[in-house]
Amino acid sequence: MSMTSLLSITPWPALSAVILLALLVVALYFARRTAHQAIRAVTDALGRGLRLASHAVARGEERLAARNREVLLSAGREAKERIVEREFVRVGDSVRKDLANYPTLHRALSESIVRIEEDQAKAVEVPPEAPGWVQAVRDPGGHPQVHGACA
């Protein structure tokens, strides 16, 4: 139905519009309970849907927070592992550098030990007695001189 056919109920279109408006108001008045129930049903369904959506979003947020925590912990763990690996490499390089001189140092220490042992062996040997030193210390009377003694 078109608007012109609705307004042609009476010969006067304004009167037809008023009659249609009055019929519409009466129909809506009798349908108010049904309309209210329909509106409540639609809003209740919408509320349940939104409640389910909010619970789903909350669970998703919790899962995302847990996942982010795991990702952050994993990233921190990996960063610390890289730091520790770099430190091991640095210490290994330092040890290799220090131990590279070990054969030279060992040879030098061995030579020093041999020289010290030879010097010690020479120091233990009693030097031969110098000829005539005992006579140089005796006095003309043939008695040994004792320093600091009163005669």
Image (cartoon, rainbow, N blue to C red):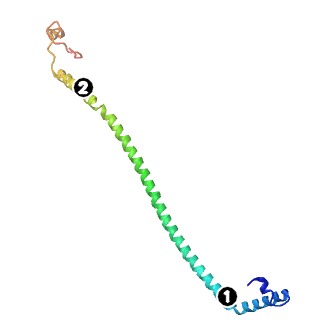
Residue 138, picture quadrant: top left
| Amino acid identity at mark 2 | Ser
Q: Which mark is residue 112?
A: 2
Depicted 151 relative to depicted 85: above or below:
above
Q: Quick one: 19 or 133, which is closer to the camera? A: 19
Q: Amino acid at mark 1?
A: Ala
Image quadrant in which the N terminus is located = bottom right
Tell me the quarter of the image containing the C terminus. Answer: top left
Give how far across and how far down residue 7 sits, in percent.
80, 86
Element type where label 2 sits in the image: helix
Q: Earlier in the sequence, mark 1 or mark 2?
A: 1
Counting from the top left corner in percent of width and height, residue 67 is at 47, 63
Query: Looking at this view, is 6 or 47 the one in front?
Result: 6
Indicate left or right for 118 with 19 as reference: left
Residue at figure coordinates x 40%, y 44% from the top left: 86
Q: Which mark is residue 84?
A: none
Q: Residue at x 57, y 80 (%)?
A: 48
| Local crowd size for mark 2, using a 10 Å CA cut-off: few (<14), some (14–19), many (≥20) | few
Give the numbered dot on residue 35.
Answer: 1
Picture coordinates of residue 3 (x, y %)? 77, 83
Residue 64 falls left or right of residue 38: left
Label 1 residue SS? helix
Q: Quadrant of residue 108?
A: top left
Residue 39: x, y in percent? 65, 84
